[in-house]
Image: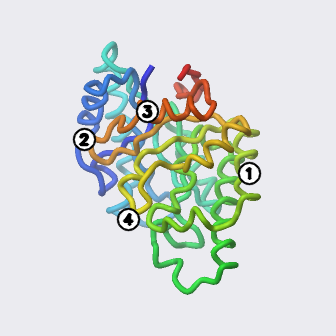
Amino acid sequence: MKFDLHTHHFRCGHADGNIRDYIEAGIAAGLQAIGISDHTPYFGEKEEQAFPRIAMGKSELARYVQEVLELKQEYEGKIDVLLGIESDYFPEHAEVYRKVLAEYPFDYIIGSVHSVGGVSIFNKNRWKDLSDRQHIEVKEEYYRLIQDSARSGMFQILGHIDAMKGNYPAFSDIPAEAILDETLKVIAENGVAIEINTSGKTKLSGGWYPAEAILERACHFGVNVTFGSDAHKPQRVADELDQVAERLKAIGFTEWVYYKNKQQVRVPL
């Protein structure tokens, strides 16, 4: 069975196409299931749409959910359309997010850390003039946030768990093996899946999130894995899906997972 659980569309302000375009791309790619998972509104901000180039406005969420549910019904028998969403994880606003998202029938929620210390993880300027020790401290804080997100009970999937390397490839070389192993143990203990996200190829780092070395450790600790292209253009739906499956098998994984009604479904690789 083939699936892609991480796709976006025009509502987030930085993706092309509408939801139907991504569903049709999924059918063309031979998928049996496609998850629509656009960015959550910024519920912790006062404004209706605090960052129009990053996420939909608060009032748009209900329309987003309704559109996905209508398309789910329309495409029944052709492809299984899953209602997902990618939620930021801000500890200080977690309960607000939890309360709002609980009002909707999501098949799954992807939890992603996009900000550390109030600065985007993709802002390469954040690393300027930092000492070696400060580099380690930032990386450790990133993984502490990911641990917290895994423990929160809010998410079925954790998004791109080494995406901080995206615009700063040297991130991967910052020594922090202990907290990385600790993070993978926490993820495994809490039964949350990590995605293999192929959008790293669109950043300076290239490749996938997470790196193969992390996937090897994830396999060792028994972490569940899933697939998400993180497509912001319809033509990227299912991008490198088959290559990811083959690499996971080579590492030692025998299955991956997807979600319906927040229930995990295991699929042989």
Gap between marks 3 and 4 measured at Cα: 23 Å
Gap between marks 1 and 4 measured at Cα: 34 Å
**Callouts 3 and 2 close, C-beta under 8 Å:** no
Dot 2 amino acid type: Asn
| Residue where numbered disc 4 is placed | 51
Where is residue 18, by image quadrant?
A: top left
Residue 210: mark: none
Residue name at image x 64 percent, y 66 percent = 139
Q: Earlier in the sequence, mark 3 or mark 4?
A: 4
Instruction: Assess disc 4: are there few (<14), some (14-19) or many (≥20) residues with their C-alpha within 10 Å of its C-alpha.
Output: some
Residue name at image x 37 percent, y 60 percent = 54
Of circles 2 and 4, the one toward us is 2
Look at the image and tell me whether residue 105 can be seen: no
- Assign a secondary structure to mark 2: loop
Q: Is residue 156 left or right of residue 82?
A: right
Residue name at image x 55 percent, y 19 percent = 268
Depth check, front residue: 185 or 171 = 171
Up/down of 214 relative to 113, above or below: above
Gap between marks 3 and 2 measured at Cα: 15 Å
Provide residue 60's location: percent of width, then percent of height: 35, 48
Q: Earlier in the sequence, mark 3 or mark 2?
A: 2
Gap between marks 1 and 2 measured at Cα: 39 Å
Q: Is residue 23 left or right of residue 81?
A: left
Residue name at image x 69 percent, y 73 percent = 137
Image quarter (top left, top right, bottom left or bottom right) of the N terminus: top left
| Residue where numbered disc 1 is placed | 181
